[in-house]
Image (cartoon, rainbow, N blue to C red):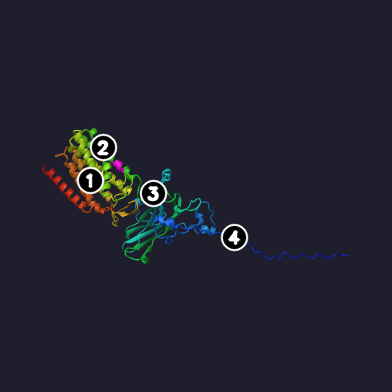
């Protein structure tokens, strides 16, 4: 008996009904990291925290976190660099890129061993071009920082929100840098966002002009370096050029001393003592005339008036004790003193001190006072040129031999230099400490120059 044929298996085309995959447990968003705590905002003495919450940084920016595709898509590389300045200031590229790489830069130090010293601080520079709208503006910069290499729970030292401002920013003043320091925070790598607006002076916030935003990642550095370095500032330039000026002055003084029949050995010893004590006098003079200001670094706040007063006293006392002709000694000293000042003022330009007021003039020179870099009156170069000219004139007269009466050349040379300084003081960015001191000093110095010239002519 034949077997019945087996039933054909069901066609494979008849697919089973698909089963929905199990739902994955929800994960926290990559942007769910907390912002700045109220304690951090209070420490920085900024606006209320709810108004200045920093932009949330994706977890992909933190160390040890595996970024997702969504998180990588949300990372902003920062804005395009600012358009090239025409012409690009030379000093603006010293210690920075003048905004050509990014509008936000970090203060760095080329020596890694020194940069890692403690205490640490953040130096942040924001570059911008002044708005073209007429009238002065106040630029308000808000910096939001978040430390990346955090191990363990975050603390207030790992975040900051701070505000810096710059008033009287005028159109046509050229590429400008504003450097702000953040102290008292943890050392490490930081993500910083900069937002800036230009508010017309006397206007309302609704008239504010938004400047380019910027963000970047940088590291903290040694706090004294962060406080001293900025675009246009060379750390160590001032002591280096002042030292060179002192050496050149000692050489010139020795040559002129022999020309006037003075023993060069005794003159050198007196000059070294006068230089050392003169530096102390420069510091004391500055503190006495600026006693309301907080004390700064050891080399900060040195006044040339204090140096000249103390050094001249030492030359008079030392020359008398050694039996030298004090008048001839001073006449051989004044060209050297002015030569040292000629070189030293160049150190002020590179070191960011004794700066001129901002100006839009074509003959302005871009320079920095360690906080604001902009076009300024080049008072350092003007004073250096004037001191060099007086040094040349007095040096030629001293080279011809002893002056009669002795000491007249010193009195006339110093008085002429004081006249130049008093004329340049209104062009400097540092306000005067006295109300009528400049006018009185200028009048006395002018009378002294005229009197010295009259004596030289009719003697």
- Is label 1 in a helix, a strand or a loop? helix
The foreground one among 315 and 157 is 157
The foreground one among 134 and 446 is 446
The x and y percentages for residue 236 are 34, 44
Q: Name the mark nearer the viewer: 3 or 1.
A: 3
- Tag 4 and tag 2, C-beta contact below 8 Å: no
Q: Name the mark nearer the viewer: 1 or 4.
A: 4
In the figure, is residue 204 to the left or right of 258? right
- Is label 2 in a helix, a strand or a loop? helix
Tell me, for residue 226, which label it has, or none.
3
Query: Mark 4 or mark 3: which comes first in sequence?
Result: 4
- Is label 3 in a helix, a strand or a loop? helix
Q: Which residue is under mark 2?
A: 273
Task: Tell me where the magenta segment starts and ends, as one range.
Answer: 241-245
Q: CA distance from mark 1 to mark 4?
A: 81 Å
Q: Name the mark nearer the viewer: 4 or 3.
A: 4
- Tag 1 and tag 4, C-beta contact below 8 Å: no
- Residue 244 belongs to the span the image colors magenta: yes
Is residue 94 visible to the viewer in this orientation of the structure? no
Tell me, for residue 25, which label it has, or none.
4
Query: Mark 1 or mark 4: which comes first in sequence?
Result: 4
Q: Which residue is under mark 1?
A: 389
Q: CA distance from mark 2 to mark 1?
A: 27 Å
The image quarter containing residue 202 is bottom left
The x and y percentages for residue 79 are 43, 58
Query: Mark 3 or mark 1: which comes first in sequence?
Result: 3
The foreground one among 240 and 437 is 437
Kindly report the secondary structure that dominates the magenta region of the rendered protein. Answer: helix
């Amino acid at each position: 008996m034949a077997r019945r044929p087996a039933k054909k298996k069901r066609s494979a085309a008849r697919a089973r009904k698909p089963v929905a995959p199990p739902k994955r447990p929800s994960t926290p968003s990559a942007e769910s990291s907390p912002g700045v705590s109220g304690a951090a905002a209070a420490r920085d003495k900024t606006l209320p925290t709810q108004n200045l919450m920093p932009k949330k940084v994706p977890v992909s920016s933190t160390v040890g976190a595996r970024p997702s595709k969504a998180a990588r898509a949300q990372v902003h590389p920062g804005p395009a660099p600012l358009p090239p300045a025409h012409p690009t200031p030379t000093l603006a590229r010293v210690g920075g890129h003048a905004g050509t790489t990014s509008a936000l830069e970090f203060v760095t130090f080329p020596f890694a061993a020194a940069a890692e010293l403690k205490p640490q601080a953040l130096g942040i520079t924001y570059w911008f071009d002044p708005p073209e709208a007429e009238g002065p503006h106040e630029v308000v910069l808000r910096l939001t920082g978040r430390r990346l290499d955090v191990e363990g729970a975050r603390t207030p030292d790992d975040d900051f929100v701070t505000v810096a401002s710059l008033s009287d920013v005028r159109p046509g003043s050229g590429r400008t840098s504003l450097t702000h320091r953040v102290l008292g925070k943890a050392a490490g790598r930081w993500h910083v966002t900069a937002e800036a607006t230009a508010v017309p002076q006397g206007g309302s916030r609704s008239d504010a002009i938004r400047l380019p935003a910027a963000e970047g990642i940088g590291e903290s550095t040694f706090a004294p370096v962060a406080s001293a370095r900025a675009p246009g500032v060379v750390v160590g330039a001032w002591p280096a050029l002042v030292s060179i000026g002192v050496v050149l002055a000692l050489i010139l003084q020795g040559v002129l001393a022999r020309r006037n029949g003075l023993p060069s050995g005794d003159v050198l010893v007196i000059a070294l003592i006068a230089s050392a004590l003169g530096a102390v006098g420069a510091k004391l003079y500055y503190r006495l005339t600026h006693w309301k200001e907080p004390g700064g670094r050891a080399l900060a706040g040195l006044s040339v008036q204090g140096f000249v007063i103390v050094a001249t006293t030492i030359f008079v006392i030392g020359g008398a004790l050694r039996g030298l002709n004090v008048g001839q000694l001073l006449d051989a000293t004044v060209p050297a003193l002015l030569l040292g000042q000629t070189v030293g003022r160049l150190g002020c330009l590179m070191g960011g001190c004794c700066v001129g007021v901002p100006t839009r003039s074509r003959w302005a020179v871009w320079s920095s006072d360690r906080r604001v870099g902009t076009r300024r009156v080049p008072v350092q170069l003007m004073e250096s040129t004037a001191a060099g000219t007086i040094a040349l004139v007095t040096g030629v007269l001293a080279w011809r031999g002893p002056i009669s009466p002795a000491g007249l050349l010193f009195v006339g040379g110093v008085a002429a230099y004081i006249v130049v300084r008093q004329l340049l003081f209104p062009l400097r960015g540092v306000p005067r400490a006295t109300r009528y001191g400049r006018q009185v000093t200028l009048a006395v110095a002018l009378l002294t120059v005229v009197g010295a010239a009259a004596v030289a002519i009719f003697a």
